[in-house]
Image: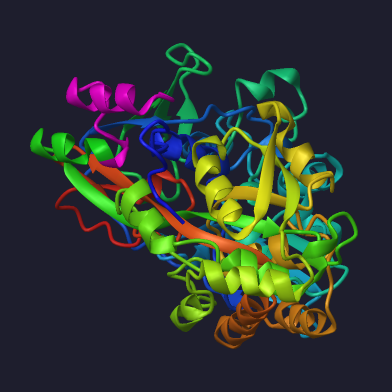
Amino acid sequence: MRIGFSHSRPTPRPRQRSQTLAAVAATAVLAAATAACDSAPATSGSGAGTTLAMSILSTPNSFDPAQLIEGQSTYVWDSIFDTLVLQDNKGELHPGAARSWSYSKDGRTLTLKIRQGMKFSSGDPVNANAVKATLDRIRSTPGQSQLSLASVSSVEAPDASTVVINLKQPDATLLASLSTAPGVIGDPKTMTAKSATLNPVGSGPYTLDTKSTVNGSVYVLNRRDDYWNKKAYPFKTVKIRVITDPTAAANALKAGETNAGTLDPSQVSAIKAAGFQITHVQATAGTYLVLGDRAGSKLKPLGDLRVRKAINMAFDRQKIVTQILRGSGKATDQLFNPKGKAYDETLNAKYPYDVAGAKKLLTEAGYPKGFSVTMPSLVFTKSFEPIFTQALADIGVKVTWEPVPAQQTTTAVASGKYPMFLLVEGLASDPIMTRSFYTPTGFRNVFHSTDPKLTKLLGQASGELDPAKAAGIYREINEFGVENAWLAPVFYIGTDWATKKGITYLGDGTSTMATIRQFGEAGSSQQSGR
């Protein structure tokens, strides 16, 4: 594979790298133990009135609890709504609005004890009925969160502080899901009203200042003095600006309009010289070529493992990271977060860059002249498409890109029209990534591929509520995916955070959830970001 193309065709610049992350930023963390006890948050802040002014790249589409979109817009809605479970910056789960939880022995009943004394911004109490109403609305309303609650058969509120979630089968991803959008608590009196889409009533640490907020442009959040976990949020005011252009975002930092934001790699040196602290996170999203039609029903060659292996051998992964991403990322042959328990560094030696070897495999499979494929051109893949076109052409696979309008991205990928497609996907926990890519009903398993060995492993993972034991199962699932070339992972994309003096970015990529708890005051004792 020739990186850089000819002199007449410029190397694609990853200027849309951050926009990509905004579109797909990920959400959940590794499932926790079967029970947790109430505890005081291990965070503190001076509360001296510091304002966090940050930029993000995507606008919240709605504040309706059933329509929340995860990604960088999570910074806004996660500040307004409580979630039943909290995940810290290391991806560990802690009590949130639910002060404790426990599973039944068969793993099919999850009982939550709701923290007492919480109130919505309207003054109404937060109780089990509000939790039940929100969960029922999310379950019955098409949206991004609905699938996360697919294992739930019913929700009960036997008393004001108890919620009982009955499951169709054990679901080890549920607790992690309840720390993200599916776990928010909406106000039953207002969450179905049209006004809730722009003027939400929540019980979270902040309220939306509707007088200062300009929807789609700037969101101003004021901290609640009566919030139960106030010490985890040291900033009295949070101003979140939507700035989609990386250059404009950097200029906002220099001008003092913001004091925190992500950077394009080309801007790091200048912003660092301007006095900002730079925190590099090596992997926050992955770029994967999904070889979805593994039965060869629409594209016969993909039904042959040799073909899928050949495609994996087409990419000079490290050279792409070095020259195209300018070092802000990591080469990979596997799906999972490199900071997760399923990740296995030894698997990255499975498919070395080998054009001749790839052509040999294609010939053995009966395709000495290669084959052609049409893939969707998506808003977040455009800047990387020339790289994939060239790499695949080098082994004899001709790609035609079919433009897809941004608003049709989800339906186009899920339609089954495209046997192969390129994704730039925000990293999530091992259980969530497994559910999305490997289960027959997963969002990214659009051809509903199955395999007896995988089915057995998925069953074991779903029923294993001990994270330590589950980790070994997810490593086996990861190995299965690599060995059987269900995808052609190529690289992770890194992120550089800039923060002004006095503000610290606390994340390291273990958890990729976008939350204000990722930021602290420099010199404070804030540790886990809970």
Does 274 sit above or below residue 461?
above
Does 232 sit above or below residue 358?
above
- Residue at the spot 15% in from the left edge and 34% down from the top edge: 270
**Which quadrant is home to the C terminus?**
bottom left
* 329 sits to left or right of 72: left
- Residue at the spot 51% in from the left edge and 58% down from the top edge: 86
**Does the stretch in magenta take in 324?**
no
Q: Give the image location of residue 312, x and y in percent.
A: 59, 67
Picture quarter containing residue 327? bottom left
Q: Is residue 264 visible?
A: yes
- Residue at the spot 23% in from the left edge and 35% down from the top edge: 267
Q: Give the image location of residue 411, x and y in percent.
A: 79, 38
Observer-nearest of 431 and 281: 281
**Does the stretch in magenta take in 263?**
yes
Picture quarter containing residue 218? top left
* 66 sits to left or right of 250: right
Q: How is the image coloured?
A: rainbow
- Residue at the spot 44% in from the left edge and 46% down from the top edge: 515
Q: Is residue 506 visible?
A: no
> In the image, which residues are magenta?
243-265
